[in-house]
Image (cartoon, helix red, strand yellow):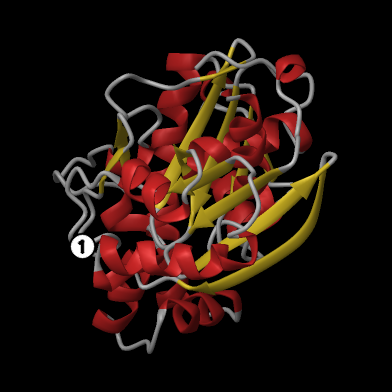
Amino acid sequence: MNLTVKESVLHSVIAFDIGGSQSRIALFEQGQLIWRNQAPTPSQLGPDAMVETIVKLYRPFAQKSLPVGVAITGQLTQGCVTGHNVDVMPGWQSYPLQAVLTERLQQPVQIYNDARAAAWGEYQFGTGAQCSEFLFLTVSTGIGAGLVLNGRLHIAANGFDAEIGEMLLADGVTLENYASGTALGHLAQRNGFDSAKHLCDAADAGDVKANELYQSGIAEVAKKLTDLAVMLGIQRAAVGGSVGLRSGYLERLRSEMQRYPAMYQFELVPAALGADAGLFGVAALASAE
């Protein structure tokens, strides 16, 4: 899909943003988010449980006829979703989510990768103004990204566009399995901390060991961003997600990026739309269908 800012307008539309911990629904009318609700994401229970959560959230609109857009993590090909990180999406293997939801909701449903939707939302309504090469990076339960190149949302045919979380590190581990919120949680427990939050809180409080552990993942994220700087000419990146928006994360990431020569650097800013970037993006995308 080749959308530009001028072509995309928010109409009356229902948007879902399915995250690793929360599934959210929003109603947009006349370009405004006017209603929302959410429920815990049953991420460990497989796709059927996810569908039931979406159906329950949709019930207030069962008698309406509005376009529906769903943003969800994973590789998307022809309306099917595959989750390559079993810690985040166990049981998702070419699951026909678009077809299943179209039948269950009795409405046409469009499916988008959540990071790509958030990139489009930030580009149009947030931090992407006057920026032709723009990146959205989300660090949360997993790690994802979306790209706007030459003013157009990048959508690859194989569903793997901007999958920064699946990029490999030197030891063959993916970036997501090393530096995401889920990975931080595993790292915390292996090193005597109760949770990822406990580790990050300790790092912010000056605990040297906790800070080294926390910073190690951020350093690997920075390395991958430097690759994108010289490969794609990225001008600005908005950082979102529950971990990425945490106080102190962006400052640490900027510090790591500044270790590299100027040609590997670009502007890093917090996502202006916060956790709503995906909702705004998927609403704009579904409106344009």
Q: What residue sits 40% from the left and 83% below the top? A: 195
Helix or strand or loop: what does disc 1 sit on?
loop
Q: Is residue 64 left or right of residue 78?
A: right
Three-letter residue code for mark 1: Pro
Would you identify the image quadrant in which residue 17 lies? bottom right
Q: What residue sits 17% from the left and 48% below the top? A: 93
- Residue under pointer 1: 90
Would you identify the image quadrant in which residue 184 lies? bottom left
Q: What residue sits 51% from the left and 75% below the top? A: 200
Circle count: 1
x and y percentages locating residue 63 in the rendered image: 62, 57
Question: In terms of depth relative to the viewer, which is nearer, 197 or 54?
Answer: 54
Mark 1, residues whose alpha carbon is within 10 Å: few (<14), some, or many (≥20)?
some
Q: Residue furthest top?
A: 150
Q: What residue sits 61% from the left and 49% below the top? A: 15
x and y percentages locating residue 70 in the rendered image: 50, 47
x and y percentages locating residue 1 in the rendered image: 49, 17
Q: Residue furthest front?
A: 63
x and y percentages locating residue 147 in the rendered image: 52, 26
Q: Is residue 192 left or right of residue 254?
A: left
